Image: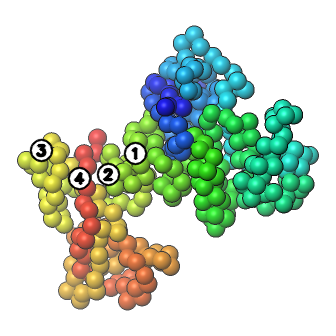
Amino acid sequence: MNVLEARGLGKRFGSVRAVEGFDLVVREGETCALLGPSGCGKTTALRLVAGLERPDEGLVRIRDRVVAGPGAWVPPEARRVGLVFQDWALFPHLDVRANVAFGLDGDRRGRVEELLELVHLDGLADRMPHELSGGQQQRVAVARALAPQPDLLLLDEPFSNLDAQLRAAVRTEIRELLRATGTTAVLVTHDREEALSVPDRVAVMLEGRVVQVGTPFEVYAAPADGRVARLLGEANLLPGRARGGRVRFALGEVEGSLPDGPCEVLVRPEALRATPDADGEARVDDVAFYGHDQLLRCAIDGATLEVRLAGPHPELGPGARVRIELVGPAVPLPARA
Ligand code: ATP
């Protein structure tokens, strides 16, 4: 069963087309991330679904009800949609229990204790928002949005106010919470790690529309084109040439059903290996060390290749000569428009 169906949504602000031809379907119990660069229209799309904006074109259906579209308009408070924003917007003068209970009628108050337990805040029910850490405030905001049992939970960059370490922990908790409660959710983010690690599916958005939808694995491994590939992670995009179902490029030849002619080949940095070699054709120009791995930027024949190596490799500092080999997938992509 589809909980959300957006078809052909369009929204202009003056001369700016914020959203155009936006299609998205989210199934029951699924978390879908909406990933895209700044300004591509993610927040506007979410606001159209929530009813905080009216579309110029297209329709929004939540379960079996058209809530926005030609001749149809259901106001936000009647859409059964929960919202969690970047700033969490807790009521500062209400304690945790009252924040979560806000908007619930009297006979459902028992649900508050249950929710606080679910988000691991049961000991903190009497605290005021300013007495909570950022991560705890975040969980209160999610519990409050879930309290009325919405059909759909919309989260707009909910982790962006948290520092990197806390962010990873809260992200895991929220993912578990959404799964445990069977919540159907749309998570807006411009953070690729978040978009790959939290949801069941990712909808990649560019210039106002969704250009690809798939599981995190699918969109990472088989992006629709070079722009999508770059949004999802570091990407070497090498020039290639397709002919009769094969694609030739600098590192070899792969199968690829593209029309004959020029194309691109995606090689993720982890699909390459660099080995120290005094006669190697490449030179390490730069190293970014992340602890669990490192990203080398290597110069080869006037081009640059990024190579990701697991574990520390102090011998591969800037200036080292290396041999580069393809050890993972090379994915042919259509030529850049
Ligand atoms: P970010 O990741 O930076 O938040 P976004 O993908 O969420 O960006 P939107 O906030 O939806 O993008 O904005 C899409 C485009 O619409 C931008 O060019 C933005 O400047 C414009 N826009 C959004 N809201 C308004 C508004 N109320 N009035 C005028 N222009 C707007």
Q: Secondary structure at mark 2?
A: loop
Of helix, strand and loop, which one carries label 3? loop
Q: Is mark 2 within 8 Å of ligand 1?
A: no
Inter-mark Cα distance, 3 to 4 = 12 Å
Tell me the residue that label 3 is attached to.
260
Q: In the shown orientation, is residue 243 left or right of residue 66?
A: left
Left/right of residue 272 with respect to residue 174 in the rendered view: left
Tell which residue pokes out farthest to the top in this image: 71
- Name the amino acid, label 3: Asp
> Spatial distance from mark 1 to mark 2, Cα to Cα?
9 Å
The answer to whether residue 192 is visible is no
- The residues bearing labels 4 and 1 have C-alpha atoms spaced at a distance of 18 Å
- Amino acid type, mark 4: Pro
Q: Residue at x 81, y 37 (%)?
A: 108
What residue would you read off at disc 1?
A: 214
Q: Position of residue 247 (x, y in %)?
A: 15, 54
Q: Earlier in the sequence, mark 3 or mark 1?
A: 1
Q: Earlier in the sequence, mark 4 or mark 1?
A: 1
